[in-house]
Image: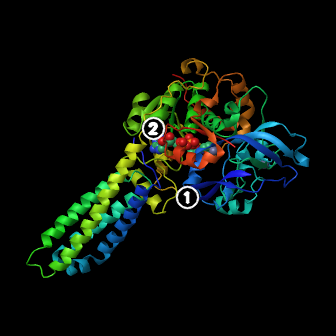
């Protein structure tokens, strides 16, 4: 079959690879009908995430049709079912899964020993991601093997297009969890850094969950215009001071809830700390850039919440932890517990409360994927979200 | 906003010049005195070290994953400074004036490369430029956002994600 394969920094190729097969009784094979490129893929593309190997198949946001089912997954799935596959693989039986903490499932990471060593304790297996999370072949391919498939799926009823439901596998629940874990009150100002696909979903989620005011920060004009369309007040961080504007908009008190939808590749602004991060990252003395985290800690209202869907891979430096401690901030972060939210969100899509397809700007064949990685990363051609059709 | 394309030929040249900057800078920092002596500029060993520090800083800036252009302009300004300093040492009273001439030639060549690279980077931006598409109609919501505010207030927020009572802001 054909798949998008990682070969090194900024080197993704449309290769021919062996077809996947059922390996475990709980597996299923899905024929992919649509998949997307996620901001997390960019961390792999730019090779900021450790644990990638030449030959890894990319992609963790995908959906399709079940074409083969292992013996123990038959109770939940049958050939012909239409499913969205969440990027977090979960067993449904371990202590964490029973609590709904699917992204830290204790069983689905087949490289558990490696993760135990690096993180202290393992997290869940993820598709098309680093070998630290199992190195499972991803969904930017014609076919995918889905482990623990009896749990790791969302069944899609008829009458909805791929475009409407595809993002249930990642960015929609990610934006939703980012907002939900802020426990938004009707008096809250929610500030969101980053108007990429995750930021866009977070903005809509914060509006639907009833925030008094949603403020979105980025520097890419078309992303800001899409943020505004979703109900956000926008700040262009290249043209205005983020801290000043946020204080202005909150009567000097600061936003109660701050969300980092940017992650480890935060763009340097003219500020000293981001120059420092860029230099250290270039010299491999620091793996992640913490500019957004610092800004959030500084501007957040005391006793407020920082929610961090943005992905970090390793070490950050010069984090003013004392400030956060003294202000009594609550930190919430993590990979998304996708299936915790999907039933509720699927219903909202069906009822027409939201249509996540608004974010798609580019749809191309899988063969054009490698070029689209670059377009998406460099934010060219108005690109916000790419959907690939194998 | 600034558009830059990583891994284009201009970008690769810029990163190469970044490594060159760091190499030269380190050499100037470590061997400032020897270099000064070689050009009959003993008095200016400190200045050469300072130039070395400048080279390292621009080099790091170029290798960082951002817009290379400001740093390239920094390099060009630095080249001008180098040329001026060398020119001031290129006089009949300097027994090492031949060596100064060699250095001048080398700096001039690198300056040409810097100018070329900067021009390439700017040309790249000009060709990459397309008008920003208008996404102001892409709300994803069935009614205007103000009307949708709180539409999902019924959503189940799991107990583990609720704000502890003591941290809640009471509505005024
Ligand atoms: N937690 C999860 O489960 C999960 C799931 C999906 C994605 N993610 C992560 O979410 C993040 C965003 O993903 P995306 O798909 O939207 O990616 P993206 O790269 O398209 O979006 C990032 C946006 O942040 C903006 N930005 C950069 N520096 C900034 C700054 N200093 N201030 C404000 N904005 C800044 C960029 O211009 C860009 O628009 C990534 O780190 C991704 O890995 C996490
Ligand atoms: Zn993702
Ligand atoms: Zn589990």
Residue drawn at 44 percent across, 42 percent down: A298
- Left/right of residue A116 with respect to residue A249 in the rendered view: right
Can residue B153 be seen in the rendering of this structure?
Answer: yes
Q: Is mark 2 within 8 Å of ligand 1?
A: yes
Quadrant in the picture for residue A5: bottom right
Q: Is residue A5 left or right of residue A18?
A: left
Q: Secondary structure at mark 1?
A: loop
Query: Numbered disc 2: what chain?
Result: A
Q: Position of residue B70 (x, y in %)?
A: 33, 52
- How far apart are the two marked residues, 2 and 1, measured between alpha carbons? 24 Å
Q: Residue at x 86, y 49 (%)?
A: A26
Same chain under badges 2 and 1? The reply is yes
Q: Quadrant for residue A330, please give it.
A: top right
Indicate the chain on which mark 1 is placed: A
Q: Is the CB of mark 1 within 8 Å of ligand 1?
A: no
Q: Reply above or below: A250 against A142.
A: above
Residue A321 % position (x, y) = 49, 50
User: Horizontal and vertical percent for residue B15?
Assistant: 41, 61
Instruction: Report if residue A150 is visible in the image.
Output: no
**In this figure, which colouring scheme has been used for the structure?**
rainbow
Nearest to the observer: residue A324 or residue B74: B74
Which residue has dot 1 on it?
Answer: A9
SS for callout 2: loop
The residue identified by callout 2 is A220
């Amino acid at each position: 079959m054909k798949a998008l394969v990682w070969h090194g920094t900024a080197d993704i190729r449309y290769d021919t690879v062996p077809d996947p097969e059922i390996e475990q009784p709980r597996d299923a094979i899905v024929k992919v009908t649509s998949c997307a490129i996620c901001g997390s893929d960019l961390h792999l593309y730019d090779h900021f995430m450790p644990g990638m190997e030449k030959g890894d198949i990319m992609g963790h946001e995908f959906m399709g049709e079940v074409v083969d089912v292992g013996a123990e997954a038959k109770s939940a799935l049958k050939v012909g079912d239409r499913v969205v596959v969440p990027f977090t693989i979960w067993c449904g039986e371990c202590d964490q899964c029973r609590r709904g903490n699917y992204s830290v499932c204790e069983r689905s990471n087949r490289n558990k020993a490696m993760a135990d060593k690096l993180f202290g304790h393992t997290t869940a297996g993820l598709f098309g991601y680093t070998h630290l999370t199992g190195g499972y072949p991803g969904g930017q391919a014609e076919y995918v093997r889905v482990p623990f498939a009896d749990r790791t799926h969302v069944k899609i009823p008829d009458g909805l297009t791929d475009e409407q439901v595809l993002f249930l596998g990642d960015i929609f629940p990610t934006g939703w969890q980012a907002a939900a874990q802020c426990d938004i009150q009707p008096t809250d100002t929610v500030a969101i850094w980053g108007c990429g696909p995750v930021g866009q979903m977070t903005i809509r989620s914060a509006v639907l969950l009833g925030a008094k005011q949603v403020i979105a920060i980025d520097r890419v004009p078309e992303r800001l215009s899409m943020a505004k369309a979703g109900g956000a007040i926008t700040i262009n961080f290249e043209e205005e001071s983020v801290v000043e504007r946020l204080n202005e908009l909150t009567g000097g008190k600061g936003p109660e809830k701050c969300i980092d939808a940017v992650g480890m590749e935060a763009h340097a602004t003219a500020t000293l700390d981001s120059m420092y991060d860029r230099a250290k990252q270039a010299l491999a003395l620091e793996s992640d850039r913490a500019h957004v985290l610092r800004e959030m800690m500084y501007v957040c209202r005391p006793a407020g919440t920082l929610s961090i869907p943005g992905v970090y891979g390793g070490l950050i430096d010069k984090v003013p932890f004392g400030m956060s401690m003294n202000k009594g901030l609550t930190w919430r972060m993590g990979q998304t517990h996708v299936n915790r939210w999907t039933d509720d969100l699927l219903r909202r899509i069906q009822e027409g409360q939201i249509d996540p397809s608004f974010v798609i700007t580019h749809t191309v064949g899988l063969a054009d994927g490698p070029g689209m990685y670059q377009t998406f990363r460099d934010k060219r051609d108005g690109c916000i979200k790419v959907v690939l059709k194998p | 906003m600034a558009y830059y394309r990583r891994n284009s030929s201009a970008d690769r040249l810029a990163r190469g010049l970044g490594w060159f900057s760091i190499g030269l800078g380190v050499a100037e920092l470590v061997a400032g005195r020897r270099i000064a002596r070689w050009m009959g500029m003993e008095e200016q060993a400190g200045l050469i070290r300072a130039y070395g520090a400048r080279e390292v800083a621009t080099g790091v800036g170029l290798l960082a994953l951002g817009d290379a252009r400001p740093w390239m302009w920094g390099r060009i300004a630095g080249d001008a400074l180098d040329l001026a300093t060398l020119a001031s040492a290129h006089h009949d009273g300097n027994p090492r004036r031949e060596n100064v001439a060699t250095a001048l030639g080398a700096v001039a060549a690198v300056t040409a490369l810097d100018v070329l690279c900067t021009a390439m980077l700017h040309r790249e931006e000009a060709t990459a430029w397309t008008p920003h598409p208008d996404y102001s109609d892409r709300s994803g919501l069935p009614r205007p956002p103000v009307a949708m505010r709180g539409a999902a207030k019924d959503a189940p927020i799991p107990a583990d994600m609720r704000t502890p009572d003591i941290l809640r802001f009471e509505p005024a």
